[in-house]
Amino acid sequence: MAALEVLTGVVAVLALLVLRGFALARARGTIVCRVRDGRGGWKSGVARYVGGELHWIPFLGLGLRPRHAIARRGLTVSSRRMLGSGEGPAGYWTVVCSTDRSAASTTRPVMAGPLCLAMSEDALTGFLAWLESAPPSAHLDAA
């Protein structure tokens, strides 16, 4: 009887995690985006643009709040290329970025550069447009 209760609890938690993933992926204004910093492999999640920041929320986790905030101010793109067949999903592009930590938000953890973002071609176009649409003063203090 106790094993059945534990199994029911595990199935309920897994179902909630799957529903959370679907809700994140289908939410308005979000894009499916993978992130890789210098410490490991790709982490899947969604990103959304909020003011001058790109908020990244991982698929695996319980919270709906962003785990990382990537500030547009001080963000520079050093390269972009299509992912190879063994590197990630087909048709995804990777963008290598570096950030200026002094220009970042202090309310959320900030991903230290360099970092790589992987996204579809449409999402990449939107990301580059968002980056280029920064106010003229946004790049004055970037090193």
Image: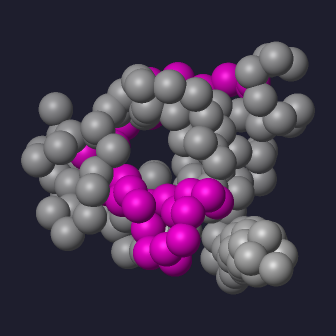
Name the foreground residue: 58 vs 91.
Answer: 58
Left or right placement of residue 107 versus residue 60 in this view: left
Name the foreground residue: 36 vs 30.
Answer: 36
Residue 8 in view in this figure: no
Name the foreground residue: 137 vs 124.
Answer: 124
The image quarter in which residue 6 lies: bottom right
Task: Give residue 4's position: percent from left, percent from top.
Answer: 83, 76
The relative height of residue 141 versus residue 20 in the rendered view (above or below) is above
Q: Residue at x 59, y 42 (%)?
A: 43
Residue 9 in view in this figure: yes
The relative height of residue 19 versus residue 112 in the rendered view (above or below) is below
The relative height of residue 68 versus residue 23 in the rendered view (above or below) is above
Give, as a single range, the part of the protein colored magenta: 54-83
Left or right placement of residue 103 versus residue 5 in this view: left
Q: Residue at x 21, y 62 (%)?
A: 105
Q: Residue at x 11, y 47 (%)?
A: 102
Residue 24 magenta = no
Name the foreground residue: 130 vs 56.
Answer: 56
Residue 57 magenta = yes
Q: Residue at x 42, y 25 (%)?
A: 39
Left or right placement of residue 123 versus residue 101 in this view: right
Which quarter of the figure is the C terminus placed in? top left
Task: Give residue 134's position: percent from left, percent from top.
Answer: 36, 60
Which quarter of the figure is the N terminus placed in? bottom right
The image quarter in which residue 2 lies: bottom right
